[in-house]
Image: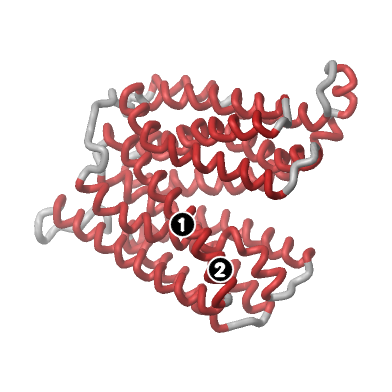
Amino acid sequence: MFFFDFGASIYFFFFNLFLSGHGYTESQLGVSTSTMAAGNLAGALPAGRLVQRWGLRNALITCTIAGPAVLCARALSPAFPFQVGLAFLTGLALCLWAVCIAPTIAAITPESERPLAFSLVFSLGIGMGAAGALAGSRMPAWFAHAAELSGGLAPDQLTLIAACVIAALAVIPAMGLRTQRTVVAPRAGALFSPAVRRVLPAVAIWGLVAGSFSPFANVFLAVHLRLPLRSVGTVFSISQLCQVAAVLCAPLVLRRAGVSNGVFTMQIAVASCFMLLALTSHPVTASITYVALTAAQYMGEPGIYSLMMNIVPEEARGQASASMALVLGAAQLIAGACAGWTFTNFGYPVAFGIIALIALCAGFLFKTAAHARSHALVPIGSQSPAD
């Protein structure tokens, strides 16, 4: 995961700059991004079936080869039709990676250790985003001399290709999964099992929360709060550091409070932060609240994934992960469009109040789903493993 996340972080930090340098407008960049999102959604359920049919190891090997290969092809030509077609394939390949991660972590860890495992994975992803930005901003200068010897490839193309090579190194640890005794042979299963159907509504509602503000956070800080661009960057940097700390602390909270109670607490905290944002326009207070909001949001993610992986049998986790990716992706696409319209027509305070209510609904739905699971699995008088 280190290699894939690090390589992908370098690539996606620099890729839009590469396209902009070849004359792409914001509109064309938006088309490319939307096409990749469409590929991600289209591939979610087929990826789950592929995991069931091939097994986790083979699926991981496939995506660690196919993903960097498609990304490398995108670095070779900036032609718009070429980029749009490959953007869809990029979404398909990255969707397979996303679908494989949760069941792989669940397969190699006992239930009691999964919150810690998911926390380490999420914090690694956030940290690799920061490291990828640092590396990606310097690599073109490193490759300036090599470009003269490459036979036509520019430094920006060499940077993207090097990022793909780093990501492809993930195939080495993926091949080692054959030694894991917990990886089981796949078998066919229902698309949405009863256990998954209990959790997916909560996942969908939470997807509306997660996708409603993140795309507009920089606009909120710069336009609504009137922060200077340098201050916006500072707030984002502090927020990212707090996200890493929150994700690493999540296992302590989840172990002490239980998975479902921990998720519920974090989502109540997110709702509270949105209410505070709705009630204040002071730049410092709102900035601190935004940092707390992102920390609480990311702190709950390990618990959500742990809860989903705990309620389904091991052989069904690939399909459950695919279902979760599909629902989250669809919810976030809807949330982005609806939130943008609400921010424009009603203003940020009203929109934040609505998002806070949605976050409360998500918290109660997760709590209800975990409660139903405990009654289904645990005899009366026993303590639920989810709590």
Secondary structure under tag 1 reads: helix
- Specify few, some or many for label 2: CA neighbours under 10 Å numbering under 14, 14-19, or 20 or more: some
Q: Is residue 74 above or below residue 253?
A: above
Residue at image x 55%, y 83%? 279
Structural distance between the alpha carbons of marks 2 and 1: 25 Å
Q: Amino acid at mark 1?
A: Ile
Residue ID for mark 1: 334
Q: Residue furthest front?
A: 81
Residue 2 visible here: no
Residue ID for mark 2: 292
Q: Is residue 317 above or below residue 265?
A: above
Residue at image x 51%, y 74%? 352
In front of the other: label 2 or label 1?
Answer: 1
**Residue 326: image location, x then y, percent:** 40, 44
Q: Amino acid at mark 2?
A: Ala
Residue 220 visible here: yes
**Residue 169: image location, x then y, percent:** 60, 24
Label drawn at residue 352: none
Task: Name the residue nearer the viewer: 46 or 340.
Answer: 340
- Whichever of labels 2 and 1 marks the residue nearer the N terminus, that label is 2
Q: Is residue 277 above or below residue 210?
A: below
